[in-house]
Amino acid sequence: MILTQAQLKEYQEKGFILLPDYFSALEVERMKTEQAHLLAGNADYTVLENDKTTIRSIHGSHTNSHVFQNLSQISRLVEPAMQILNSQVYVYQFKINIKAAFSGDVWQWHQDYIFWRKEDGMPTNRVTNVVIFLDDMNEFNGPLFFIPGSHQEGMIDIVTQNVIDSKEQNNPQWSANFSNNLTYSLNRHTVANLVNKYGISAIKALAGSALFFDSNIVHASPSNISPFSRSVVIITYNSVENIPVSIPNKRPEFIVSRDYQSITPVSDSFLITK
């Protein structure tokens, strides 16, 4: 499955494209069941909210779950990623972000690529993300906010805004990049100027939708004070021609994959049948 020329143009101009009804109810239920299994599993791969009990995100699930490994390889995700990047791809990062009812916290305004550039040595932004919605996302439960077209600004190179002493908080060092106090968050002045120039979009999508977005688009999400939890899977596909350079203090492999083997797309049915 590939994007139409109109869809590809929308992605290139806005920095994202929303694809409703991309997964069936049965497929969504399979993923939600697997998510529940993972939530009861390896705590080493999770990030907690500030309350130290609510799970904020789970990382690297494609390495320890057949369901999510198959998801990362199905043609309806891999082929559009290859089309967008004009290249073979591999899974660079896999995470499940959770906005728990009443306690899911904010994700500050940021771009993704600056983290991968500065933390991992990724040469260029020849990389794309795809979001799979496991629950309905609406105006109540902390939806994604995008500044459409802001990816055209390129990477906004900023001085580190927030530094968290992970040791003091008994957290692994890598978790600082996934907290509610992001290392490379954008300041209010920058965000205000970008919104004045490009506008702002709040994403509303039903479970089973998918959304591809550019690594330089500025985005955020508010806290979830509603009684409605929501979860999304986010898979980052990197071009095999964009391998990160070697740097000291590498982040764990469940955060940043070092398996650069290109993906051979598998049948979409693998998500259910395998």
Image (cartoon, rainbow, N blue to C red):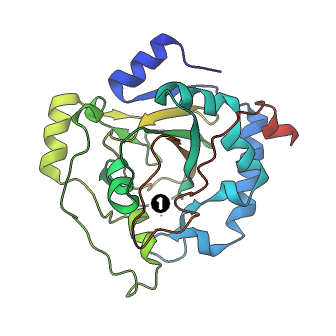
Q: Which is more toward the observer, 256 or 56?
A: 256
- What kind of element bears circle 1? loop
Disc 1 residue type? Gly
Question: Which residue lies under the disc numbered 1?
Answer: 104
Residue 126 vertical position relative to residue 121 in the rendered view, above or below: above
For the C terminus, the quadrant is top right
Say how many tags the image has.
Answer: 1
Judge whether residue 143 can be spotted in this image.
Answer: yes
**Left or right: 70 in relation to 14:** right
What is the residue that sits farthest to the top in this orientation? 5
Taking the spot 40% from the left edge, 19% from the top edge, the residue there is 10
Residue 33: % across, % down: 76, 52
Q: Position of residue 31 (x, y in %)?
A: 72, 47
Local packing at callout 1 (Cα closer than 10 Å; few below 14, some 14-19, many 20+) is many
Residue 172 at x, y = what percent?
A: 47, 78
What's the residue at 61%, 54% (across, down)? Answer: 259
Quadrant of the image for the N terminus? top right
Quarter of the image holding residue 145? top left
204 horizontally vs 193: left or right: right
Image coordinates for residue 18, horizontal then vertical, percent: 49, 27
Residue 205 appears anywhere in the view: no
Taking 120 as reference, is 218 above or below it? above
Up/down of 173 relative to 190, above or below: below
The residue at 48%/27% (across/down) is 84
Residue in view at x 66 percent, y 57 percent: 61
